Image (spheres, rainbow, N blue to C red):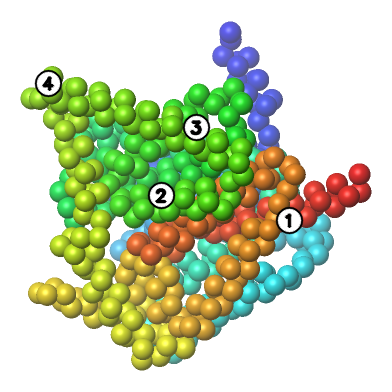
Amino acid sequence: MDLNIIFQKIKEKMATDDKAFVLIVFCFFIVALAKVFFGFVPWYFLIVMMPMFFASLLHPKAGLFGLIFLTVLFERFFTLEALQFGRDIVKLYPLDIVLFGVYGGALMKMISTKVHLTLDIIRVFFFLFLILVSVYLGASFVGFGSQDISVAVSTWKNYVFYGMLFFVMPLILEDESDVKRLVNYFLSAVIVGIIFLFIGIVRGEGLWTEFTPLSTGGIRLLAFPHAFYFSLAFLGLFVTETFWAKGRYRAFLWMMLATFMFGILGSLMRHIWIGMFSALCFSYAFLLSTPLRQGAKRMFSIGLTFVLILFSLAFFLTLTFPTSTVGHFTYSLVETVSIRFSSIGSNTDTSISWRGSTWDSAFFTLSENPVFGLGFGVRIPIESGDYRDFVEIRNIHNSWLSLLVQMGILGFITFLSFFGVLVWRVWKAFSVFPFLSALRIALLTIVFYQSIVFFAQPYLETNLLGIFFWFTLGLMYTLLSLVKKNSVGTRKL
């Protein structure tokens, strides 16, 4: 078939939002090439980012799709690559450029369509939290807490600027088909991201794993952020298996689930393992009906069979070719994963002991002002044996504790009120529509998982991780809107 005919058919099937998405991705590739050639992104590449902004402004759905796709594939090189003006660095990231466009597009839509905003209890608590965070930022400029204004501004961005995704997503995602497209873009990005796992296997070490060094022996095959994205995709697909089990792509999705799990194990991120296990237990006990539980059991049986086959193959290769590259690799992998499993909860693990000392110090420092907290940008002293250091509150590897210490009981309760009411509403939001029902189960499972892993790493304090928490909350509120809209339509029928 002629290539022109193929391209014409693709063009006909692509919606306007999809074309805008392609433009956003293409422009970022040019920016990424600048990083490769120059080692940094010169300020004049802001011109290349302008089409990304305008595409997101005119097509905010495409902006959301681009945010997810590029963050999953390029993680910190999309979300944390600042512009450089001579010797000065401006922390304006490609992620921020696209987000400005998305927010502007949502605002234009509100004005042009005269959207009537309803301030329910969820949004009230959300805006109270945003206002409170902004007050804390203002207080940083007059000396409350902050030892570094740039850190205070960064904290505000993580809570407010990225948090506004929760507000705009229900405005942009108008119906069930929009949500499906968003989910498909995310899954497509994660599937493409499997290439990073293959690179890790070939190299013997995953790309960008140097940013998260191990406290035990071993080498990561997959970077921490990619493992996190894999885990979100795995959990969402696993608990909704009955929704897609009869589809024509079911065999492919089962293979993807197995690959995701292999990558997650190869990342050696223990807290992700614990979080996933806890979330699956929670979902099985409280969310899945009898047919869904049978589907989960079937998925578990398939997964266990696959693991046993892999283990048997690895055992055979190790015994048959003990000195070969394959034999050495499989033995090393099994040994490393075993060591990581056995080190969970061990006091001799430096990572765990560091967290214990850091959290003790954080609680002790919080006692000075438990109601209002310490403010943004503060460092706390850490003492653990011969180890002495001052650590930023946002880097204490516990997002819940970081929020509590920075904003005190006042800010913490405000956020928990918003979060708790939202989760409770979604918990009660049953729907007769299969996709919305599956989405509810997936979102509750994922948000439970995120709540667990927040205890172990600075998720909310790192935009390439925290942004998916705000995506989850935004989808939860979108789900509530769609369930309400469909229930009204059903009653009218």
Q: Looking at the image, tell me whether mark 1 or mark 4 is earlier in sequence order.
A: 4
Q: Looking at the image, tell me whether mark 2 or mark 4 is earlier in sequence order.
A: 2
Q: Nearer the viewer, mark 2 or mark 4?
A: 2
Q: Which residue is mark 1?
A: 481
Cα separation, mark 1 vs mark 3, equals: 33 Å
Q: Nearer the viewer, mark 1 or mark 4?
A: 4
Cα separation, mark 1 vs mark 2, equals: 30 Å
**Type of residue at label 3?**
Arg
Q: Which residue is mark 3?
A: 298
Cα separation, mark 4 vs mark 3, equals: 34 Å
Instruction: Identify whether 451 is placed above or below 416.
Output: above
**Type of residue at label 2?**
Phe
Q: Which residue is mark 2?
A: 277
Q: Nearer the viewer, mark 4 or mark 3?
A: 3
Residue closer to the observer: 329 or 65: 329
Q: Is residue 43 visible?
A: no
Cα separation, mark 1 vs mark 4, equals: 58 Å
Mark 4 crowdedness (10 Å alpha carbons): few <14, some 14-19, many ≥20: few
Q: Quadrant of the N terminus?
A: top right
Q: Which residue is mark 4?
A: 321
Q: Looking at the image, tell me whether mark 4 or mark 3 is earlier in sequence order.
A: 3
**Type of residue at label 1?**
Ser
Q: Nearer the viewer, mark 2 or mark 3?
A: 3
Q: Looking at the image, tell me whether mark 1 or mark 2 is earlier in sequence order.
A: 2
Cα separation, mark 2 vs mark 3, equals: 17 Å
Residue closer to the observer: 307 or 405: 307
Mark 3 crowdedness (10 Å alpha carbons): few <14, some 14-19, many ≥20: few
